[in-house]
Image (spheres, rainbow, N blue to C red):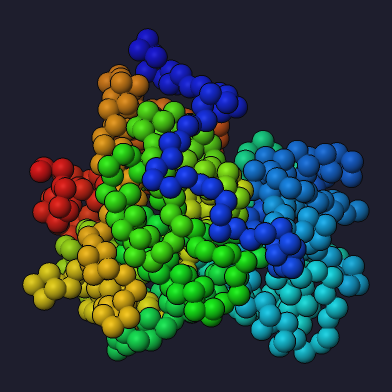
């Protein structure tokens, strides 16, 4: 690579089994006690196949047999999302809809695509509709359901309300729907982009939708991320924005803070996501967000406030040996009484997995790759013990300004606008990471902080209540800490409830990021960096670490795939706009939380 500035960095094959990392077990071995017996499990019928993959091709010019072959070929690239079964419907009029299914308990039912009673509507869904029982009860026209799937309610809702039915859904979803009677096809994505979806256009004029970029890369000349909170309608070939919350319309909300309402709304959000007929658990870093999720889930389970197939709650954490997260997570697990699994990995094992992580994540964003690698490794171990779904804490930092750079926010207006900017971009960062790092191993991650009703409450609170005021004891995310600070019936130990924010890529062990930087220094030379702007004119890498990730990405996803990944300067995960808050940010733009020099306890200069 030293002979030419444009030579790609040599890499191992993604298919090499030697690339797959080895994990060391921590304090608790992942044995099976606490799981339900087979007899008990059979008493449940799965309400939904969790993490799935959808692929649809519309308006193709291919003959039917070739179209079927293409759809199957594209759908196979998503099989890690749904390895148990696949279904496909090929229409006479140049349309094909495919689905990769992850069956949980009863593999004999619930296959997709789903088809309406009269055969006119075809539906393929990835996601969960948490309020499906309520929606069934509200139907004006009786409908005979073929399955227990929570997603099937979409069909009668569409027949009654047209595309506007999406306003009634509470959940995470991306789906395509074909109405044979009208020759009309639609595609929808949830309000925050929790589940992924891409859209592309083929050389023959076809329109394609896929859960991942892999499904489009070989057949589309143009593609993009399908925007959250939108639907596409073939009647006008346009995207329509269906999610229009008032808190994102440019104004600064000023609702009075009600801590009890915040606590009740978040407990409801967690409870909604405990809907499962399969073994599930919680991701537990030991930080505030994941610990609150774990605490509420454990309470609901112990106090029999929800039905559960689990006899006890399993929790999971990962880090380098001696990392901050492992110690904090163990403390929380001991307090809550979860069956805890601590996993460790080495810096070298993480580096060995980087190429595979980028392939599955479909991004070269530095922060996302850093944080996704430990999550990817942990998901493999979680899958090996039979867990199919996990609750996770993504979204809290965006809603409440939890990142350490918010310490420098100058006023309530900027604070609110930055949280809105963060949420509007979250589908390209933490939502992408949480979904794809887990679905790579056939696991579903659910995120209570992004519950639509909880967002409606929390994002309308006066931003001055969210601002960090260390002199008066208000650290980052003070609202959530205060809402769950109930000494008579504590949710968490006090030291955990008020633990400083750690970004996941930092919390797994500070030497993880340092090790990545050292590795990139060895792999990328100065001549490559000098000519980086010529090789990568879009989102030109500014560091050797970024150059390394971009090179790997481009080896799997050629032009114009790089356009699906965001860019721009960042300080501790900020948007580019927040760089203006502090002069020091401009000279120290690194996505790690330790880049906030006079705020983080382990800042770089220390």
Residue reaching furthest to the top: 3
Q: Eyeballing the image, is 441 above or below 246?
A: above
- Residue 151 seen in the figure: no
Residue 184, given in percent of the width and then of the height, sits at: 79, 65
Residue at (43% x, 54% y) in the render: 340
Residue 226, given in percent of the width and then of the height, sits at: 57, 57
Residue 234, given in percent of the width and then of the height, sits at: 73, 63
Q: Eyeballing the image, is 269 above or below 76?
A: below
Tally of marks: 0
From the viewer's perspective, tell me whether residue 216 is left or right of residue 536: right
Q: Nearer the viewer, residue 118 or 402?
A: 402
The C terminus - image quarter:
top left
Q: Eyeballing the image, is 410 above or below 223?
A: below
Q: For residue 91, what is the image quadrant?
A: bottom right
Q: Nearer the viewer, residue 65 or 496?
A: 496
- Residue 600 seen in the figure: yes
Residue at (31% x, 58% y) in the render: 331
Q: Eyeballing the image, is 242 above or below 283?
A: below
Residue 182, given in percent of the width and then of the height, sits at: 84, 69
Residue at (63% x, 61% y) in the render: 36
From the viewer's perspective, tell me whether residue 381 is left or right of residue 106: left
Residue at (51% x, 73% y) in the render: 301
Q: For residue 400, what is the image quadrant?
A: bottom left
From the viewer's perspective, tell me whether residue 356 is left or right of residue 261: right
The N terminus - image quarter:
top left
């Amino acid at each position: 690579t030293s002979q030419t500035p444009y030579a790609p960095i040599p890499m191992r094959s993604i298919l090499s089994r030697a690339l797959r990392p080895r994990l060391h077990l921590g304090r608790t071995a992942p044995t099976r006690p606490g799981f339900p017996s087979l007899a008990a499990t059979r008493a449940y019928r799965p309400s939904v196949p969790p993490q799935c993959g959808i692929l649809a091709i519309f308006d193709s010019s291919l003959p039917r047999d070739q179209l079927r072959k293409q759809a199957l070929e594209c759908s196979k690239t998503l099989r890690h999302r749904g390895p148990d079964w696949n279904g496909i419907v090929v229409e006479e009029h140049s349309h094909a809809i495919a689905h990769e299914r992850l069956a949980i308990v009863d593999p004999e039912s619930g296959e997709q695509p789903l088809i309406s009673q009269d055969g006119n509507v075809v539906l393929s869904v990835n996601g969960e509709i948490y309020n499906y029982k309520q929606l069934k009860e509200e139907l004006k026209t009786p409908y005979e359901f073929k399955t227990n799937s929570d997603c099937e309610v979409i069909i009668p809702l569409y027949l009654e309300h047209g595309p506007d039915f999406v306003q009634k859904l509470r959940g995470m979803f991306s789906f395509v729907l074909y109405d044979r009677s009208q020759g009309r096809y639609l595609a929808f994505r949830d309000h925050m982009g929790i589940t992924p979806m891409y859209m592309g256009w083929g050389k023959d004029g076809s329109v394609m939708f896929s859960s991942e970029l892999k499904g489009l890369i070989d057949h589309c000349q143009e593609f993009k991320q399908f925007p959250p909170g939108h639907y596409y309608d073939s009647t006008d070939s346009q995207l329509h924005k269906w999610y229009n919350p008032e808190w994102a319309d440019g104004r600064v909300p000023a609702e009075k803070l009600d801590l009890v309402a915040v606590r009740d709304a978040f407990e409801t959000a967690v409870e909604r996501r405990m809907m499962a007929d399969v073994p599930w658990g919680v991701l537990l870093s030991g930080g505030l967000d994941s610990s609150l999720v774990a605490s509420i889930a454990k309470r609901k389970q112990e106090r029999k406030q929800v039905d559960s197939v689990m006899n006890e709650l399993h929790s999971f954490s990962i880090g380098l040996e001696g990392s901050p997260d492992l110690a904090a997570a163990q403390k929380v697990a001991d307090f809550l009484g979860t069956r805890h699994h601590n996993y460790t990995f080495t810096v070298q094992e993480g580096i060995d997995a980087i190429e595979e992580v980028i392939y599955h994540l479909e991004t070269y964003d530095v922060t996302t790759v850093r944080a996704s690698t430990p999550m990817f490794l942990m998901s493999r171990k979680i899958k090996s013990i039979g867990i199919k779904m996990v609750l996770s804490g993504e979204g809290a930092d965006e809603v409440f300004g939890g990142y350490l750079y918010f310490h420098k926010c100058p006023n309530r207006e900027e604070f609110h606008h930055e949280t809105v900017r963060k949420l509007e971009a979250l589908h390209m960062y933490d939502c992408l990471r949480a979904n794809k790092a887990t679905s790579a191993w056939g696991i579903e991650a659910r995120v209570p902080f992004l519950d639509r009703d909880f967002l409606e409450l929390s994002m309308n609170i006066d931003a001055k209540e969210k601002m960090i005021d260390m002199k008066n004891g208000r650290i980052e995310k003070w609202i959530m800490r205060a809402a769950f600070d109930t000494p008579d019936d504590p949710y968490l130990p006090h030291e955990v409830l008020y633990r400083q924010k750690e970004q996941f890529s930092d919390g797994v062990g500070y030497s993880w990021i340092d090790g990545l930087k050292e590795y990139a220094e060895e792999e990328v030379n100065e001549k490559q960096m000098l000519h980086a702007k010529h090789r990568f004119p879009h989102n030109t890498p500014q560091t050797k670490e970024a150059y390394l990730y971009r090179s790997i990405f481009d080896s799997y996803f050629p032009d114009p795939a790089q356009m699906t990944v965001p860019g721009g300067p960042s300080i501790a995960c900020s948007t580019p706009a927040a760089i203006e808050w502090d002069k020091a940010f401009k000279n120290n733009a690194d996505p790690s939380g330790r880049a906030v020099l006079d705020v983080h306890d382990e800042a770089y200069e220390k």
